[in-house]
Amino acid sequence: MGLTSDSTPTGLRVALKQLEHLWFQVAGTRCNLSCHHCFISCHPANHSFGFLSRAQVQRQLKDSVAMGVKEYYFTGGEPFLNPEMVPILIETLEYGPATVLTNGTVLRDSWLQQLVDAELQSRYSLEFRVSIDGVSPEQNDPIRGEGTFDRAMEGVTRLARFGFLPIVTIARSWPLDKEDHIVEVFADRLRRAGCDRPRLKILPMLQLGAEVTRSGPYAEGDRITEEMLVEFDRSQLICDHSRIVSDRGIHVCPILIESPDSLLGENLAEADRSFSLEHGACWTCYQHGAICSNPSQGK
Amino acid sequence: MNVPCNRIALLGGIYSNYLALEVALRDINYRGVDAIYCLGDLGAFGPFPDRVFPLLDEQGVQCIQGNYDHSVGHALDDCQCGYTDPRDNYFAQKSYDYTLKNTSDTNRCYLQHLPKQRQLHFGRHRVLLCHGSPRRVNEFLWESTTTDHYLDVLLDDLEIDCLFATHTGIKWKRDLNAGRRFVNVGVLGRPENDGQTCVWYTLVGDHGSGPVDIEFVPVHYDHRRLAREMKGEGLPEAFQQTILTGWWTTCLESLPSKERKKGRF
Ligand code: SF4
Ligand code: SF4
Ligand SMILES: [Fe+2]
């Protein structure tokens, strides 16, 4: 496919309509867990992407004002492995609403106390999204590691104890017709764990990174075609309104950071370019819509 | 369009709450305004959707199209409210099917042809009225998830001084750069999840200098009667509870954490 002008994206190219969501790969690819389905293969010794420093985040926050960013998201790896995570969030809440995607297993009371205070002082919401797989250790632990279900539930309870309303995200690992039942059982379990207003969000499984070995890579035919984009509401795609900051620069979306072509520039202005949806993961986005926004339970 | 005067009334979603609409319009007439606008979502939630139309017509209320009006107008399959929770969707679907079935063809045609936005000159102020946001009819602009700079850039791009929206169901306002304002005008359709049964509309005044003046006005109406009528029409019990208690029982999953924590459920 040839290059096209950014103002008139054609074919498979999607332009950044408006930078509404700014993401930070704040913990790089470092995680205390090494889940089988992790779409960027994070683990304790994966240094392929590094931590973002508070100064790096601050610079982007400043730049984001002129771009009119509406919400800020933090992911990794496990964001709370970054030693500057708490001050980073406190600073972000001066700019706008913040959402952290965490595995819930490393949270500490002293951090949560500081964050409660920061949210109270801010006019903006601080959201925690805790990822778990399945409604029991039997379902979760084979994927995420021994004991991780209980530890994540402990994290959810801890957040609830500090007055937060964590959103629990579950990567779907069951047939769709079982979904309502599974969601119900799980919400019940969360209530018993002290989370009296459970918020659940189901994510589609992405076949990238470690997940490739678990359920096989995308097939050749699993690609977006030009016809598929005709009349398609592109705002369903994260790349239509988001960018993500890593220690290498600004990438098109959180899903593709490992693809060299996802790196669009060093600053937000440079990253305001269109992108060609040629990746297998783009096909998943197309099928499932925005998988990463906050409202609980996306299908 | 030019509004020469100095006061207008803005109504948010009515959601078929014709009883609250009656009281609000009486109050507005008593106070005196130069024009009345409704920011869309005439039907939904409440009983007898056709009853709001003659009231709006009598008072010359100028409406724009909400997501619900677009759906009912075009007889689409759902309300496009943007909910993502299955329980929310279940109740939303029940009330949508009821509303669609009970809206006359004439009124559906009226909804179908409503403008999506309205630009006004109000005194010196350039004003835009929209439903969700100028970008998306069903975008939620909540107080705790909308940054100042998001609004500033929006107003810059549109070259306006004041932006008014509804859709979320909870009123709020923000002062921006250079005396500009954003206001979510709230809704007449249901109480706003604070344990009070009243609903709200918004008065906007212009004093010739300085920013526009915003007053949120509570509307106390016969909410017990509304709940009774909803019951009679077989509308969800959860919706009646909201009307009777002032707490939301559904659509909770679209609320950001700050707004959600203020409610009971
Ligand atoms: S899925 Fe999340 S918790 Fe699991 S290894 Fe990846 S980043 Fe860590
Ligand atoms: S993976 Fe999804 S968000 Fe990323 S570029 Fe492809 S379509 Fe866009
Ligand atoms: Fe609406």
Image (spheres, helix red, strand yellow):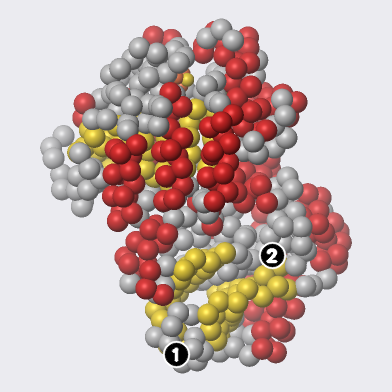
Dot 1 falls on which chain?
B
Q: Residue A117, relative to residue B199: is it above or below? A: above
Mark 2 or 1: in front is 1
Q: Calculate the distance from the C-alpha at mark 2 to the C-alpha at mark 1.
A: 32 Å
Residue B128 in picture, x, y percent from top left: 44, 73
Instruction: Look at 13% across and 37% down and name the residue there.
Output: A2
In front here: A135 or A129? A129
Looking at the rendering, which quadrant does residue B157 occupy?
A: bottom left
- Mark 1 Cα-neighbour bin, 10 Å: few <14, some 14–19, many ≥20: few
Q: Residue B236, relative to residue B23: is it above or below? A: above
- Mark 2 Cα-neighbour bin, 10 Å: few <14, some 14–19, many ≥20: many
Say which amino acid is labelled 1.
Gly
The numbered disc on residue B189 is 2
Establish whether labels 2 and 1 are both on one chain. yes
The residue that disc 1 covers is B208
Check if mark 2's residue and mark 1's residue have beta carbons within 8 Å. Answer: no
Residue B234 in sight from this viewpoint = yes
Q: Quick one: quadrant of the C terminus of chain A?
A: top right
Indicate which disc, 2 or 1, sits on the residue closer to the N terminus. Answer: 2
Residue at the left extreme, as displayed? A2
Dot 2 falls on which chain?
B
Secondary structure type for disc 1:
loop
Secondary structure type for disc 2:
loop
Residue A18 in sight from this viewpoint = no
Residue B190 in picture, x, y percent from top left: 71, 62
In front here: B207 or B115? B207
Instruction: Look at 23% across and 30% down and name the residue there.
Output: A248
Residue B226 in picture, x, y percent from top left: 81, 65
